[in-house]
Image (cartoon, rainbow, N blue to C red):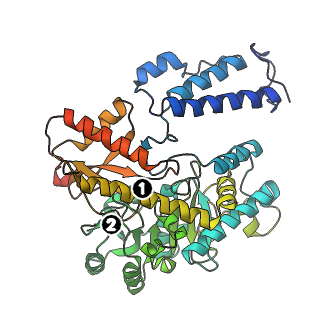
């Protein structure tokens, strides 16, 4: 393989082959160290317009070959301008921070570049992927259980929709969908991927029915039962109930046991979207929030959220072994030539070519163990409760609800939550988002970075109050039509 030529362009007639020599490793380490220093020095990057970024970062591809040093300089510039998700001032999404061992596993997955469709090509990587699925299935209570890695929680939820649809309509995988109206039920606080997925797999976005939630953001089982009976009377076909464990804004957990009773009565597939909340199963003192999950037919669980694996590491788990293969298998004699189906995960996957998203999770779990994850999640809970206590004690702030998980939603009285979040970013104080709770825009804090301490929380709340003091009075109430967070 060809070597990198430092500081000069290579002959255009030569292939762009690249060996991992010492100079490449050294330059990569320099970029990593520079990025880490920048996270410490400038944890919230300055806001820059798309026009400014295009003008200064050489983003457009011109078709020309450029010297190695020019490319690495361009990479450094891109990293310096990219918003940080790993600093202690990032609270904007349901992931944050950097797990060192998981990151190491992810880097090695890239170096190995292992395809994850056959044991012939993947070897032990296929075995460790299965080990991750088995461990997660055991935590859910599926014995033995099954599952697949997916490109993210949204695709796990879509896979569950496909399976539920095919299970409800015999022959639909081969012959297509009949004319019946198919209905999916989910909380009004669900993740938007449920409705999006329904539109992508032929069910129809308009056939997703949003079940009312209580004041804590949890699905109302009585309303669910009434809606299902009403739809059956009208000739519709209920095919799936989606329960949410860890809603995006409030961190609410739907009552799975009660919902499972209804799913069983109605003969409908029960899926639990635990992309955000699945990690609670690793915390012995909190796992009761998902009581009844072992009765579900399928479960989404994202390890790249509260387990700290780099994006993405997501799994769809099924109670019945072989369900994914039943609905996703396709013969390919040029690919599947050796070993049994369990050793050829491409027979069950949504994809053919697929990166190794299991190695980083496997490495982190090997390092932390169950006890390490239990301690980490308890730490996140403690930060959430500390934040809630500070809000309760301050007459200038109002807590939207007692935290159920590691989400904390609150308002600064008579001040715009949306404008406060914007100003936090503009002034390079923190990246924080807002969410809608009971018809009001609230500041939404989420804890997923195990390097965050109460000192960081205190500093952020002080910044929020200082910014709010400069803003004019404004009500956070919104129009009822905009109140659904799904």
The residue drawn where x is 43% and y is 61% is 381
The residue drawn where x is 27% and y is 79% is 222
The image shows a total of numbered marks equal to: 2
**Looking at the image, which is closer to me, 297 or 105?**
105
Asked whether residue 174 is in view, the answer is no
Question: Where is the C terminus found, in terms of image quarters?
Answer: bottom left
Residue 23 locus on image (x, y percent): 79, 26
Left or right of 313 in this view: 482:
left
Give residue 88's mark.
none
Q: Nearer the viewer, mark 1 or mark 2?
A: 1
Of helix, strand and loop, which one carries label 1?
A: helix
Asked whether residue 78 is in view, the answer is yes
Give the quadrant of residue 320.
bottom right
For residue 184, above or below residue 400 = below
Of helix, strand and loop, which one carries label 2?
A: strand
Q: Residue furthest top?
A: 8
For residue 281, above or below residue 275 = below
Left or right of 463 in this view: 478:
left
Residue 71 locus on image (x, y percent): 66, 21
**Looking at the image, which is closer to me, 72 or 452?**
452
For residue 421, above or below residue 124 = above
Query: Which residue does the numbered mark 1 point to in the structure image?
Result: 383
Q: Residues within 10 Å of mark 2 (few under 14, many from 20)?
A: many
For residue 218, above or below residue 391 = below
Query: Which residue does the numbered mark 2 point to in the structure image?
Result: 187
Left or right of 347 in this view: 179:
left
Disc nearer the start of the sequence (1/2)? 2
Residue 447 locus on image (x, y percent): 44, 53
Give the quadrant of residue 258.
bottom left
The residue drawn where x is 50% and y is 61% is 377
Question: Where is the N terminus found, in terms of image quarters?
Answer: top right
The residue drawn where x is 26% and y is 40% is 465
């Amino acid at each position: 393989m060809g070597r990198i030529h430092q500081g000069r362009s290579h002959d255009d007639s030569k292939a762009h082959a690249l060996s991992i020599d010492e100079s490449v490793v050294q330059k990569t380490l320099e970029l990593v160290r520079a990025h880490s220093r920048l996270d410490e020095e400038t944890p919230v990057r300055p806001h820059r317009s798309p026009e400014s970024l295009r003008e200064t970062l050489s983003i457009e591809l011109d078709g020309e070959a450029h010297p190695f040093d020019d490319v690495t300089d361009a990479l450094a510039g891109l990293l310096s301008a990219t918003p940080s998700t790993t600093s202690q001032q990032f609270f904007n999404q349901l992931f944050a921070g950097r797990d060192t061992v998981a990151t190491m596993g992810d880097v090695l997955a890239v170096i190995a570049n292992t395809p994850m469709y056959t044991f012939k090509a993947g070897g032990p990587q296929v075995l460790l992927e299965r080990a991750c699925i088995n461990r997660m299935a055991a935590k859910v209570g599926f014995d033995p259980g099954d599952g697949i890695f997916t490109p993210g929680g949204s695709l796990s939820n879509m896979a569950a929709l496909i399976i539920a649809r095919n299970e409800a309509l015999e022959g639909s995988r081969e012959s297509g969908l009949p004319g019946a109206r198919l209905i999916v039920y989910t909380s009004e606080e669900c993740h938007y991927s449920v409705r999006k997925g329904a539109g992508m797999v032929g069910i129809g976005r308009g056939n997703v029915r949003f079940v009312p939630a209580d004041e804590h953001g949890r699905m109302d089982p009585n309303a669910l039962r009434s809606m299902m009976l009403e739809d059956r009377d009208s000739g519709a076909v209920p095919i799936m109930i989606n329960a949410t464990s860890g809603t995006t804004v409030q961190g609410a957990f739907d009552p799975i046991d009660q919902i499972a009773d209804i799913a069983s009565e109605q003969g409908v597939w029960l899926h639990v979207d635990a992309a955000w909340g699945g990690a609670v199963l690793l915390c012995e003192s909190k796992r009761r929030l998902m009581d009844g999950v072992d009765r579900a037919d399928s479960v989404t669980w994202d390890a790249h959220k509260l387990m700290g694996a780099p994006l993405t590491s997501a799994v769809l788990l099924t109670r019945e072994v072989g369900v994914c293969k039943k609905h996703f298998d396709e013969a390919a004699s040029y690919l599947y030539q050796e070993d049994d189906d369990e050793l050829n995960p491409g027979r069950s996957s949504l994809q053919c070519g697929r990166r190794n998203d299991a190695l980083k999770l496997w490495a982190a779990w090997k390092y932390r163990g169950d006890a390490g994850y239990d301690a980490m999640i308890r730490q996140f809970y403690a930060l959430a409760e500390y934040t809630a206590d500070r809000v309760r004690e301050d007459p200038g702030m109002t807590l939207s609800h007692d935290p159920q998980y590691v989400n904390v939603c609150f308002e600064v009285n008579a001040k715009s939550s949306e404008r406060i979040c914007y100003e936090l970013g503009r002034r390079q104080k923190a990246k924080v988002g807002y969410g809608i709770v009971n018809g009001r825009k609230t500041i939404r804090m989420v804890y997923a970075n195990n390097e965050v301490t109460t000192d960081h929380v205190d500093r952020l709340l002080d910044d929020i109050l200082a910014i709010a003091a400069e803003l004019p009075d404004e009500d956070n109430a919104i129009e009822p039509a905009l109140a659904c967070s799904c």
